[in-house]
């Protein structure tokens, strides 16, 4: 009887112990992974409960012929695991789906329990013939593409992409210049537009009447103080230089604001 | 219970073959639910909501069925020298299954009715999970060697009297 019971108290052989240990380690790894998954799932549910928000975007002209769109995203991490390698991309397309500008932020680490404010700035340079120029004078629907990538809890690289449409109010909507003769050597220049932007315009409109050959026939300046959503319509008589014929020429204008802001406006034909 | 002649029981008690088959058959049910039923239900649920994953029903069914059957067979042949090889086969099948999933570990899900697209990469998770069958294969190899060198050595510890 003792010989029958003996194996129960003997130390198991090495190979048996090794196989058993390997199986137990495998089981332990599985349990740990499942526990980690459950932990992450719970933490993700806490993150989802505290959704990100944005502060809205402000816009302004910059001195270097650039338009700036600035805002910020508030990203709360309500979970108890970090969100690492967070990158936020934003891209703007105009109504014809032409590229306007983009912004990239990151990489950032959002600590557990934190509420991080991430600034977003998009610079839109005004260059002749570029898509950005149309933003000055044409109200349109812009496509805003936002996508973010991050790794949650060290384990899950994830991303989210959102495409939304935002209406754009042009600061010089329906900009138009008309010229009429106001007597010998005098040209009446009328400039009209509507300020559909969210900001007020204070400054001046400096313009020049240019002959078809390129010579400047005359210049003028109009004071501008146009609140948001208001119209502008002003006429100024310009003395034409002797020998200069504005017929078939153009009127070039720029909006000048404090802090050396210069915004070139589209060139309009005289007549 | 009837079945093949059992090895001599020097200090251990091997359950009869019929009992082992019955126990393995009962174990097969939850295995099939976990490895086949639930994944298929998940794929069907996501599919009905317009979200399709790169994993096919056939892959899930095929591998799930194979792993469950091999795991059940492992229990049946546990007292024999086939235990090690069948353990290796079961773990190797699970390993290959995970490798197949690893090749399609990036999911891009377009949320229906919105302009939102979510992408998720589960490669790291699957890579970690690969450790589990890897340990299973290693254990199977060790058991195969043990059974070849010292037949029935482990039986008193597997089936104590």
Image: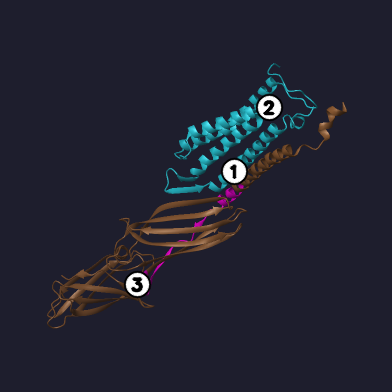
Using the image, name the chain to which the residue with label 3 belongs: A
Q: Few, some or many C-alpha atoms within 10 Å of disc 3 (few <14, some 14-19, many ≥20)?
A: some
Mark 1 element type:
helix
Farthest residue to the right: give it: A2
Find the distance from the CA under tag 1 to the CA under tag 3: 55 Å
Q: Quadrant of residue B37?
A: top right
Q: Please give the name of the residue rendered at 83% of the width and 35% of the height, measured from the top-left corner.
A: A9
Give B104 or A76, whichever is nearer the viewer.
B104
Q: Quadrant of the C terminus of chain B?
A: top right
The chain that appears brown in the image is A
Seen in the image, is A189 located left or right of residue B94? Answer: left
Instruction: Tell me which label, 2 or 1, sits earlier in the chain.
Output: 2
Q: Are marks 2 and 3 in contact (CB under 8 Å)?
A: no
Query: Which residue is label 1 attached to?
Result: B129
Residue B18, given in percent of the width and then of the height, sits at 68, 20
Instruction: Give chain B's shade.
Output: cyan
- In this rendering, do the residues under marks 1 and 3 share a single chain? no
Identity of the residue drawn at 57% across and 46% down: B127
Residue A183, placed above or below residue A98: below
**From this viewpoint, which residue is outermost toward the top?**
B2
Which residue matches tag 3? A65
**Would residue A112 be found to the left or right of residue A134 on screen?**
right
Tag 1, which chain? B
Quarter of the rendering containing residue A113: bottom right
Quick check: B57 above or below A134?
above
Which residue has dot 2 on it?
B80
Q: Is residue B40 visible?
A: no
- Same chain under badges 2 and 1? The reply is yes
Say what secondary structure mark 2 lies in. loop
Callout 3: SS: loop
Q: Which residues are magenta?
A: A42-66
Q: CA distance from mark 2 to mark 3?
A: 83 Å
């Amino acid at each position: 009887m003792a010989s029958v019971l003996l194996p129960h108290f003997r130390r198991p052989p090495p190979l048996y112990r090794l196989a058993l240990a390997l199986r137990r380690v495998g089981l332990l790894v599985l349990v740990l992974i499942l526990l980690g998954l459950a932990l992450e799932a719970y933490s993700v549910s806490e993150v989802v409960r505290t959704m990100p928000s944005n502060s809205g975007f402000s816009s302004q002209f910059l001195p270097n012929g650039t338009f700036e769109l600035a805002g910020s995203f508030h990203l709360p991490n309500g979970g108890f695991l970090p969100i690492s390698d967070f990158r936020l991309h934003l891209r703007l397309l105009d109504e014809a789906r032409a590229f306007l500008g983009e912004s990239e932020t990151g990489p950032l680490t959002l600590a557990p329990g934190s509420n991080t404010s991430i600034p977003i700035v998009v610079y839109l340079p005004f260059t002749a013939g570029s898509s950005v120029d149309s933003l000055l004078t044409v109200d349109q629907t812009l496509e805003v593409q936002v996508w973010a990538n991050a790794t949650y809890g060290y384990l899950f690289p994830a991303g989210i992409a959102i495409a939304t449409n935002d209406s754009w109010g042009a600061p010089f909507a329906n900009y138009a210049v008309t010229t009429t003769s106001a007597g010998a050597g005098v040209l009446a220049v009328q400039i009209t537009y509507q300020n559909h932007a969210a900001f007020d315009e204070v400054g001046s409109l400096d313009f020049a009447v240019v002959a078809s050959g390129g010579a400047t026939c005359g210049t003028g300046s109009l004071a501008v103080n146009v609140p948001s959503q208001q119209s502008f319509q002003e006429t100024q008589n310009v003395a034409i230089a002797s020998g200069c014929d504005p017929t078939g020429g153009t009127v070039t204008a720029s909006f000048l604001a404090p802090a050396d802001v210069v915004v070139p406006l589209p060139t309009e034909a005289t007549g | 219970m009837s079945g093949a002649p059992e090895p001599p029981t020097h200090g251990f008690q091997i359950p009869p073959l019929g009992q082992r088959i019955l126990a393995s058959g009962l174990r097969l049910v939850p295995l099939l639910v976990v490895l086949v039923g639930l994944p298929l239900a998940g794929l069907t649920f996501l599919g009905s909501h317009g979200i399709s994953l790169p994993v096919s029903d056939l892959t899930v069914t095929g591998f799930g069925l194979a792993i469950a059957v091999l795991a059940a067979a492992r229990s049946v042949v546990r007292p024999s020298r086939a235990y090690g090889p069948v353990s290796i086969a079961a773990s190797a099948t699970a390993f290959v299954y995970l490798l197949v999933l690893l090749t399609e570990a990036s999911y891009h899900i377009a949320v229906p009715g919105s302009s939102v697209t979510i992408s998720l990469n589960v490669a790291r998770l699957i890579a970690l999970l690969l450790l589990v069958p890897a340990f299973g294969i290693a254990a199977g190899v060790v058991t195969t060697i043990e059974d070849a060198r010292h037949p029935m050595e482990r039986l008193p510890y597997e089936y104590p009297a």
